[in-house]
Image (spheres, rainbow, N blue to C red):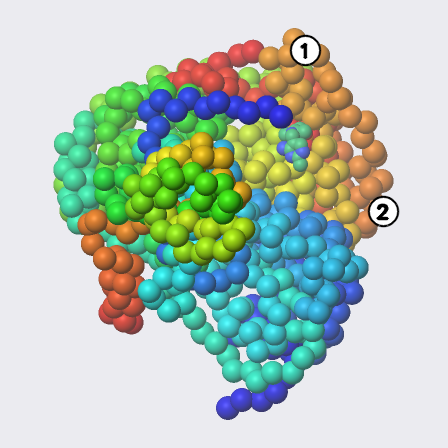
Amino acid sequence: MKEKITGSEALMRSLEHEGVKTIFGYPGGAIMPVFDALYDHLDRINHILVRHEQGAAHAAQGFARVSGKVGVCLVTSGPGATNTITGVADAMIDSTPIVVIAGQVGAGLLGTDAFQEVDLVGVTQPISKWSYQIRRAEDVAWAVARAFYIARSGRPGPVVLDFTRNAQTELADYEPVSLDFIRSYDPDPETDPKMVAEAVRLINEAQKPLVLVGQGVELGNAQEELKAFVEKADMPCGCTLLGLSALPSNHRLNKGMLGMHGNLGPNVKTNECDVLIAVGMRFDDRVTGKLETYAKQAKVIHLDVDPSEIGKNVPVDVPVLGNCKRTLALLTELIQPHRHTEWIESFKPYEEKEFEQVIKKEVYPSEGPINMGEVVHAVSEATHNEAILVTDVGQNQMMACRYFSFSKNRSIVTSGGMGTMGFCLPAAIGATFGCPDRMVCAFMGDGGLQMTMQELGTVMEQQASVKIILLNNNYLGNVRQWQAMFFNRRYSFTPMMNPDYMKVASAYGIPSRRVMERGELDEAIREMLSTKGAFLLEVCVVEEGNVLPMTPPGSSVNYMLMEC
Amino acid sequence: MLIQIEDMENKTLYTIIVHSENIAGTLNQITAVFTRRQINIESLNVSASSIKGVHKYTITCWTTEDIVEKVVKQMEKKIDVIQAHYFTDPEIFQREVAMYKVSMPEFQSNPEASKVVRRASAHIVEVNPTFAIVEKVGMSDEITALYQNLKELNCVLQFVRSGRIAVSTSCFERVNEYLAHREERYRNGK
Ligand SMILES: Cc1ncc(C[n+]2csc(CCOP(=O)(O)OP(=O)(O)O)c2C)c(N)n1
Ligand SMILES: [Mg+2]
């Protein structure tokens, strides 16, 4: 049965057909017909008005990361569209499924430098999984179906739909489209049985296996398969930043975080293991350190859904292509049970060393100003390690990821590959819509908060229950730390003047509290958590604190500074 | 302008054959893979393939096997790219076509001229009182050699050469089988 409707109405119905219930957006001239159509769908679609389109993109990311669903943004052409670009690039490098729908000038004006015209497809092609211009109303259903399929399948990523104004208003037949096949695109490449056999042989023979857990495990919804796999062969794991909640923090085989500011154990052991099994991770340079010395002694098995990741940075001996939910189960069935007691024990001295030299001072100090680590630890404990952690970028991010613990999957939302300051607040807003029943704790720095601080308006209007923990050190701390370590303490433009955040919060009607004394911290956290809705907790932390341990740039992964 | 003389050691001339859906913007995405890795494209030919709706790209570049492998994978990652493969010269039959517009008075006044053309197995495809057009199909260096020879006779007015086109020696368009296999897997999965 067909009926003629406008392209805008077709968009609404297509979104509903994809199960969309939440949209983050901001109106403008070139998208007005769509916003007008939206007005009749508000009983089924909840539109969240952000305060800046970058916020819409990050909110969609936060929504997608915690819920596993596709996040949706709706913005106008020109500046509305370009404002989302940081979010699109961020979603690309962190494999987050979002669909950005942007208005565009009418097809007749394309290429004329019309008002608010920007070649959005051209601009976003290199930073999106797919970008497409809809020029005719009759293409809407197909384009939306294709967009959602591409965004969510295989290795997820951002899709951009550039919707010309004429296509929004023209009439066309509408019939819902469901799409699950594109002949030029293989979201789950075939697994070579020979490679599986070879991986099984290596794992069975391994004396010192190490598993690297990436976000692919969460994206593939393979958390249980991973657990079964590592438990059967008794293999210790290190998690990437985005993979932190794929395996519970307190699991006996979880040896902590990989990378530059990760835990000493898994980093050192990367260069000692005999078989390295990477699952849904991409050997980012923040994880590997110097490639020339990275895991040279080990046979490398790489499970990934994206063939272009195999051998991209680290040579791979045995590639196992395909969705890791499938391939992990396949391997688990074929490998033999094993005990690696001695090997697992050998992590202990490194854990103790890190505790003595770094963690004890950071998390359990007896005097001096408050540390970031102790704040994070206290909040994590107070939420029984069950909350969603959203972070910004900088020292606050590294400290939050080091000292927050996870017991539930899909609990870490952070900008990994891009390191986008300003990501946290809007992403946290998105997370509250993605998982309305979960506690969302958003840790940010004074620099990062000010990059997207306008989204406090969205928090206010939506009564979004974001627990904002501002770790205020009066510095662009991460850069300051590098200046201290590598630029002779020349603090070029890293001290920063701050506003009175209590006044800022109160202007938005958000309850807040500032903590300067250690003795007040626990009580303030209790107040934050027991207050209904949003809360801004500003903790004035040590100004010149440093994130440790640290693998200095260009150093080998097993070389970590314990002090600086 | 600063021209960087690249270290050509350890580099090989690879021919990359790409099949993609005929969708606007695909060429951009394919060339962007080279730009990102700072690889110069030596030649590029795009045309319809034997399969309806599928375009075929023949691209040559100097690089290493390690890099060309990554380049090909990154191209295949693009949604509308069906397949990409790389080949070395022994693995393909390849040709280029060139046209040489020569000045008729000069050409006729020198008895060497028509010998040069014949020796090169080139054809004269257009003749009039002012100019002639010589057409040559062949390998890259043959085309260059003919240009040098004609230039020495001082008769070349214009010269143009195409990008390389190539077919692999191993099998016919693998892309046929690939598409059939994809559709079959999809049906079986249902
Ligand atoms: C958009 C953006 N601009 C600049 C940077 C570079 N940068 C990384 S961390 C950092 C400092 C962050 O300061 P703050 O938000 O106060 O966090 P802190 O490190 O002090 O915890 C800067 C400037 C970035 N990552 N993103
Ligand atoms: Mg700061």
Secondary structure at badge 1 equals: loop
The mark tally for this picture is 2
Would you identify the image quadrant in which residue A30 lies? bottom right
Q: Nearer the viewer, residue B101 or A500?
A: B101
Q: Is residue A302 shown left or right of residue A144?
A: left
Query: Which residue is under mark 1?
Result: A489
Q: How many residues crowd mark 2 within 10 Å: few (<14), some (14–19), many (20+)? A: few
Look at the image and tell me in which quarter the C terminus of chain A lies. top right
Nearer-the-camera pick, B16 or A197? B16
User: Gap in Å between the C-alphas at discs 2 and 1?
Assistant: 37 Å
Query: Is residue B57 found left or right of A505 in the rendered image?
Result: left
The amino acid on which the numbered mark 1 sits, given as a three-letter code, is Arg
Q: Nearer the viewer, residue A493 or B84?
A: B84
Element type where label 2 sits in the image: helix
The chain letter under disc 2 is A
- Residue topped by disc 2: A507
Question: Does residue A536 lie above or below A366 as drawn?
Answer: below
Is residue B171 at all visible to an observer of this figure? yes
Residue located 38% across and 32% down the image: B63
**The disc labelled 2 sits on which kind of residue?**
Ala
Q: Residue at x 75, y 57 (%)?
A: A113
Q: On screen, A519 above or below A55?
A: above
Seen at 16% across and 45% down, the residue is A194
Point out the tag, 2 or 1, that comes first from the N-terminus. Answer: 1
Give residue A461's position: percent from left, percent from top: 76, 58
- The residue that appears at 35% across and 19% down in the rendered structure is A293
Task: Give the percent coordinates (x, y) of residue A23.
Answer: 63, 63
Of circles 2 and 1, the one toward us is 1
Residue B145 to residue B7: above or below? below
Residue A307 in sight? no
Q: Nearer the viewer, residue A151 or A183?
A: A183
